[in-house]
Image: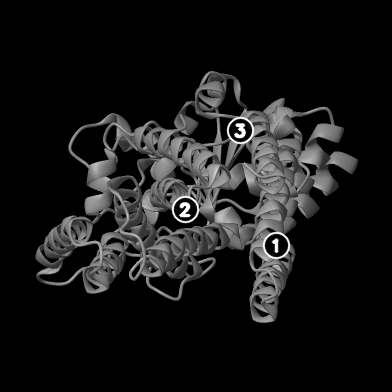
Amino acid sequence: MTTLEFAIGAAYLVAAVLFVVGLHLMRAPSTARRGNLISAGGMVVAVLATVVFALLDAGGSVWAWIALLLGLLAGGSFGVVRARTVKMTDIPQLVSLFNAVGGGAAAAVAFADFVLHLTGVTLGLTSLVPIVLDVLIGSVTFSGSLIASGKLQGVIPSRPLSFPGARVINVAAVVVALGAGVLSILSPHNVVLLVVVLIASLVFGVLMVLPIGGADAPVIVSLLNAFTGLAVAMAGFAIDNQAMIIAGALVGAAGTILTLQMAKAMNRSVGSIVLGGFGTGDEKAVAGAPGQDVANIRQVTADDIAIQLAYAQHVMIVPGYGLAAAQAQHEAADLATLLTDHGIDVRYAIHPVAGRMPGHMNVLLAEANVPYAQMLQLDEANAVFDTCDIALVIGANDVCNPDARKPGNPVSGMPILDVDRAKSIVVIKRSMSPGYAGIPNPLFTDAKTGMYFADAKRGLDDIIVAVKEYITA
C-alpha cells in the first residue's frame, strides 16, 4: 500500500465515523441540525479525498483535471444554489430530485466500470454482481424519483395514474431486467445485456411510481431514498470504495427502517403501496366554497374562532398538507406565540405521514422557529387530546379521520390523531373536498366541529387579527 492509498483510506475512515455520528444525532429534533452538519462534513472529506486521488491518478492528463474540476464546480454550485433558494414547501420534491441524482450517479459509476473492463481483465463475480445490482437499483431509483418529484411539484398529476396492461408491462420489465442481469454476469463482455438491464429498470421505475397516489408520497420518498443508499453501496463494492459502501449502507438501512415506520403509520404494507392505486390526488378546491356534503356542517367565522381561542387554556394545532400548500407555517407559529404570550398552553400534533415526505410538518414548523418542545408526535398528542379546549385543524384530512377506527374503508386501521376527542374542534379548509383517500371525513360534520372555509394563510391571518382584538379588549 502506497502512502497516498493509506492517506485516502484514512480519510474515508474519518468520513465514515462522521456519517455514523451525524446519523445518530439526527434521531432527535434538538440535535438534528448539528447531525446534518457533521454528516455534511463527512461528505466533504470523502469527496475531497476522492477528487485528490483522481487528480493524482490522472497524472499529467490536462483533460482529466478539467473534467474533474468542472464536474465538482457544476455539481457543487447547483446543489448550493438549489438548496438555498428552495421554498420550504418544495423540500419534498427537492429530496426526490436528490434521490434521482444519487441513484443515477451510482448506476453511471457501475456502468462506466463495466465498460472500462470490456477489453481488459475479465471481472469476477465479486465485481459483476454489484455492478448489475447497482445498474438495476440505481436506474429504478433515478426514473422513479423523477416521477415522484414531478408528482410532488404538480408537473405530473398526483393522483394514481395507470393504463390497461400497466401491471403486465411492470412484470415484464422486472423479468427482462433480472434475466438480462443474470446473462450479464455470465457474459461479462456483453455491454448490450447491461444496456437492456438499464432500460428495463428505467421503465419499471416509471411504472412503479405512476400508480402511487399522493397519500403514499411519504412512504415512496422514503423507499426511493433507501434504494439510493443500496445503489451507492453497490457502486462502492464495484469500484472498491469503502466510503461509498459505508455511506450507502447507512442510507439504505435508515431509509428501510423509515419506510417500514411510514407504512405502519398508514396501516399499509410496503408491497401494497408499491402496487399503488391508493388516493385521489390533489383536489383543486376553491377557497371559501363549502362544496358538497354541507347539510350537517356548522360554519364559523374568524371572530367565532377568536373567542374560543382567547378563553381557552389548552390549544392543540393539527397541521396538514393544506398548511404546507398555503405556506402558512409562519402564520400558525405567530398565532401560537400570540396565545402563549397570553398564558395559553399551545402545542402541535404531528402525524408521521402528514404532508408529502417523512417529517414534512416538523421541517415546516422548525423553519418557522416553533420550539421543539411544542411538537407532539402521534402517541404523545393522542394522550392529551381529552384535555384540549380546542383543536385547530389546519389543512389536515385523512390523518384525523375517525372512520379509520371502523372496518371496510380505505383508511381502516390507520393510526390517526384523535382530534374528535377534544372539547371543541375548528377546521380550516378550502372546501369539503375529500382527502387523498377519497372518502368523506365525519369529523367535519361532528356537532363539536366548526368549519372555517378559507386558504390556510388568509384564514390564520384573519384569526390572528380577531384574537388580538379580544385579548386587548
> Which residue is disc 1 drawn over?
56
| Residue 206, x across and y down, in percent | 30, 67
Q: Where in the figure is residue 287, as x and y percent of width and height?
A: 54, 67
N-term-proximal mark, 2 vs 3: 2
Q: Is residue 270 left or right of residue 82?
A: left
Task: Identify residue type, mark 3.
Answer: Ile
Q: Amino acid at mark 2?
A: Ile
- Counting residues from the start of the chain, the first of labels 1 and 3 encountered is 1
Instruction: Say if residue 390 shows up in the picture.
Output: yes
Residue carrying label 3:
390
- Whether residue 455 is situated above or below residue 471 in the rendered picture: below
The amino acid type of the residue labelled 1 equals: Leu
Look at mark 2 in the image and give the residue it sits on: 239
Q: Where on the picture, by quarter, is residue 315?
A: top right
- In which quadrant of the rendered view does residue 281 lie? bottom left
Element on which disc 1 rests: helix
Q: How is the image coloured?
A: one colour
In the rendered image, residue 406, in percent from the top left (x then y), is placed at 25, 31
**As rendered, which of 17 and 201 lies closer to the eye?**
17
Residue depicted at 42% across the width and 49% down the height: 297
Disc 3 on helix, strand or loop? strand
